[in-house]
């Protein structure tokens, strides 16, 4: 994503989000998903992008006079759906990581026990475990 866009979003909303409980919760969620971005930056980009999309959809429905749904309601639904989709993607990534750890952990433990039984020093054991491919363990 473009850094200029991120900076603009942060200037618009970042100072209001910084230090809030929502930012703290998202920082933890982003850390669990292994995404290296601050929570306030992520939320700023998420809210501004969702708002721009909602305004575009609401404007299009208003201009075209489509009376299938109220343009304001459609804009609100688009905002909620796009924000929810991004949050679902984050939680899905966290769940995939947890499943990968559960899948690879028995092999890593077995590898460690075999190396420990052969008399490998603990520091070498950790180096060998880190250099082997055991996924997210």
Image (cartoon, rainbow, N blue to C red):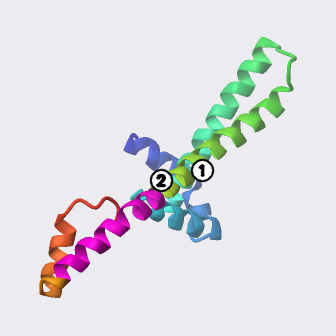
Q: Is residue 7 magenta?
A: no
In the image, 32 versus 9, the foreground residue is 32
Give percent across and percent down for residue 55. Answer: 69, 31
In the image, 13 versus 137, the foreground residue is 137
Q: Is residue 89 visible?
A: yes
- Spatial CA distance of label 1 from label 2 is 14 Å
Residue at 77% of width from left, 12% of height from top?
A: 64
- The span picked out in magenta is 97-116
Q: Is residue 11 visible?
A: no
Quadrant into which the C terminus falls: bottom left
Seen in the image, is 64 located left or right of residue 83? right
Residue at 44% of width from left, 49% of height from top?
A: 7
Give the mark nearest the N terminus, 1 or 2.
1
Q: Tell me the SS state at disc 2.
A: helix
Seen in the image, is 120 located left or right of residue 51? left
The answer to whether 75 is drawn above or below residue 5 in the figure is above
Disc 1: which residue: 87
Specify the label residue 96 is tagged with: 2
* Dot 2 crowding, Cα within 10 Å, few <14, some 14–19, many 20+: few
Residue at 23% of width from left, 59% of height from top?
A: 133
Q: Quadrant of residue 14?
A: bottom right
Q: Main secondary structure of the magenta part?
A: helix
The answer to whether 91 is drawn above or below residue 137 in the figure is above
Residue at 59% of width from left, 67% of height from top?
A: 25
Give percent across and percent down for residue 17. Answer: 60, 62
Give percent across and percent down for residue 106. Answer: 36, 68
Q: Tell me the SS state at disc 1.
A: helix
Specify the label residue 4 is tagged with: none
The answer to whether 112 is drawn above or below residue 43 in the figure is below
Which mark is nearer the camera, 1 or 2? Answer: 2
């Amino acid at each position: 994503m473009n850094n200029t866009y991120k900076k603009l979003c942060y200037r618009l909303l970042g100072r209001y989000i910084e230090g809030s409980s929502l930012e703290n919760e998202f920082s933890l969620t982003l850390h669990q998903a292994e995404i290296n971005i601050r929570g306030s930056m992520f939320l700023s980009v998420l809210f501004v992008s969702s708002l721009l999309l909602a305004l575009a959809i609401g404007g299009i429905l208003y201009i075209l006079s489509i009376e299938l749904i109220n343009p304001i309601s459609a804009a609100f639904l688009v905002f909620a759906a796009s924000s929810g989709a991004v949050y679902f993607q984050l939680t899905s990534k966290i769940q995939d990581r947890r499943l990968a750890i559960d899948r690879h952990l028995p092999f890593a433990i077995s590898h460690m026990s075999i190396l420990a039984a052969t008399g490998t020093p603990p520091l070498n054991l950790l180096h060998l475990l880190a250099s082997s491919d055991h996924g997210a363990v």
